[in-house]
Amino acid sequence: MLDFSDLPVVDAHCHPYRRADALSPEEWVDALAFGGGSPAYLREGGIDVDAAARSLLGRLKRDTLYFRFMLRRLAEYFGVEATVDAVVAARNQAIVRDGYAAYAGRLHGAGRIETLIVDDGYPLPQINLDQFRAEVGVEVLPVFRIEVLIQDLLDDDCGWSEFQRRYDESIAEALGNGGYRGLKSIIAYRTGLDIDPGSRSPDQGRVALERLRRARGRGEDPIKDLRDHLFCRAIERCIDFDAPFQVHTGMGDWEVHLAACRPALLMELLRYPAYRACKFLLVHTGYPYHAEAGYLANVLPNIWCDISEGLPFAGNAGKRIIAEVLEMAPISRVCYGSDVYGSPEPFYTSALLGKQALAQALGELIDDGFLSGTEAQEAARMILADNARELYGI
């Protein structure tokens, strides 16, 4: 089997996390596990979030294949039994013994993680990135999530002239002087990826905002017109600054409208002539619609695929996701990413799983005569780090 354990990693999509020196087993599971719903999900359904309900949510998170993988790899790392109690106790002891920064730095080093490209739109309130850099011991490059800015402007209840000025100036400042290496949008969560490429017309934003202010919950909500317009404005700013635009596609948490998140819905927008100079990263490769993202990266030269979230959270499907994306996507357009958050541990175990899945997928391509061993090693280097370095100018 191929071994990529010594190859460096650039995590093309992940999130910063708040320092937590000591966590209980329950807090640790809740902080970094994926799936299982949330207390908010239950409360919105009128379900009492009592001890039994919290226990159920925790059990569902622990019963995913990725969580089991993470627990086993961390148990091996710490040299303890593969139980949540034992791993969390070892984690807390290591932080007390060595200090938080040294602990986090060692975990990132063990995964050969060199750079984290972070979407600091989650968690909120936003984390101080200078402090985060000091605590993780690796290069940290942020991308600017436009929905945080949009919500702030909507909350301020300003008119269109001020709204568009502050929107454009904030993005220009972020990309020009703020240290941000690109933009990010989760419009898929809000109004979906069926974005009208003509939404950049001069009056659409103004008319949509005025209608939104007048509506106040009455009749048709014009928010989609406004968000489509602002998305298209953001594309133009990315072109101005030669910065990539990360677009959430596919899976997310329980609030996501999965049918509106398919990468194929972006086709008209992505091939619109005015936007062809923008470099788009399809975050999560649209999993479970990842074949669509691979196809888009094949036929459109300005599209990259980021295999985060499906890998690691889909567990053993990682090798299948990579193989199916590579059915169409050029090797030079696929980037490793994790979408992990919460604590240093999943960054390490996601890198392990990513390298394992990549070795399995590329090994099969060698066996089937599509790649030589040398080509597979080069492909792994590109996917794990070099493609993201090229995209972000690292």
Image (cartoon, helix red, strand yellow):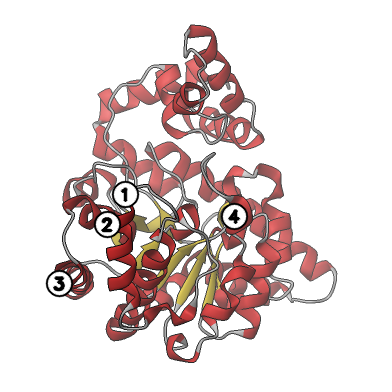
- The residue that appears at 32% across and 36% down in the rendered structure is 103
Query: Could you tell me which quadrant the N terminus lies in?
Result: bottom right
Is label 1 in a helix, a strand or a loop? loop
Answer left or right for 157 relative to 349.
Answer: left
Q: Which residue is mark 2?
A: 213
Q: Quadrant of residue 24?
A: top left
Q: Amino acid at mark 3?
A: Asn
Q: Which residue is mark 1?
A: 216
**Mark 4 or 1, nearer chain start:** 1
Which is in the foreground here, disc 4 or disc 1?
A: 1
Does residue 288 appear anywhere in the picture?
yes
Whether 1 is drawn above or below 35: the answer is below
**Mark 2 or 4, nearer chain start:** 2
Q: Amino acid at mark 4?
A: Lys
Q: Which residue is mark 4?
A: 355
**Mark 3 or 4, nearer chain start:** 3
